[in-house]
Image (tube, rainbow, N blue to C red):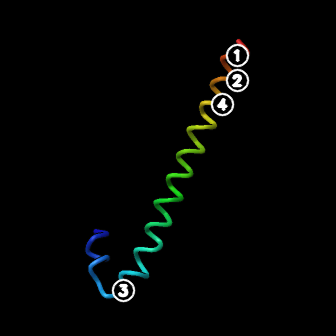
Amino acid sequence: MVEDYCSSPGAPFLTAPYSFLRELHGWVVGCFCFLFLLFFVIGFSSL
């Protein structure tokens, strides 16, 4: 679906938000994994 939009004349206006969302998604997943590991270590050390 995204490839169809990228082949249209207005591609630069559409690919920029998509790449930004991909970057943001990566950051969110990274932070979530870091917090999960942090809470896991804290919970494990408190046992």
C-alpha distance separating marks 4 and 1: 11 Å
Label 3 near label 4: C-beta < 8 Å?
no
C-alpha distance separating marks 4 and 2: 6 Å
Assign a secondary structure to mark 4. helix
Tell me residue 6's x, y (percent): 31, 76
Label 2 near label 1: C-beta < 8 Å?
yes
Judging by the rendered image, the residue that carries numbered circle 3 is 10
Q: Relative to residue 11, is residue 20 depicted above or below?
A: above
Q: Residues within 10 Å of mark 1 (few under 14, many from 20)?
A: few
Quarter of the figure with residue 3: bottom left
Label 2 near label 4: C-beta < 8 Å?
yes
Q: Amino acid type of disc 1?
A: Ser
The quarter of the picture where the C terminus appears is: top right
Q: Residue at x 62, y 25 (%)?
A: 40
Residue that extends furthest to the bottom in the rendered view of this protein: 9
Judging by the rendered image, the residue that carries numbered circle 1 is 45
Assign a secondary structure to mark 1. helix
Q: Amino acid type of disc 3?
A: Gly
Judging by the rendered image, the residue that carries numbered circle 4 is 38
Q: Residue at x 49, y 63 (%)?
A: 21
Q: Residues within 10 Å of mark 2 (few under 14, many from 20)?
A: few
The quarter of the picture where the N terminus appears is: bottom left
C-alpha distance separating marks 3 and 2: 49 Å
Q: Amino acid type of disc 4?
A: Leu
Say which mark, if any, is on residue 19: none
Q: Amino acid type of disc 2?
A: Ile
Tell me residue 5's x, y (percent): 31, 77
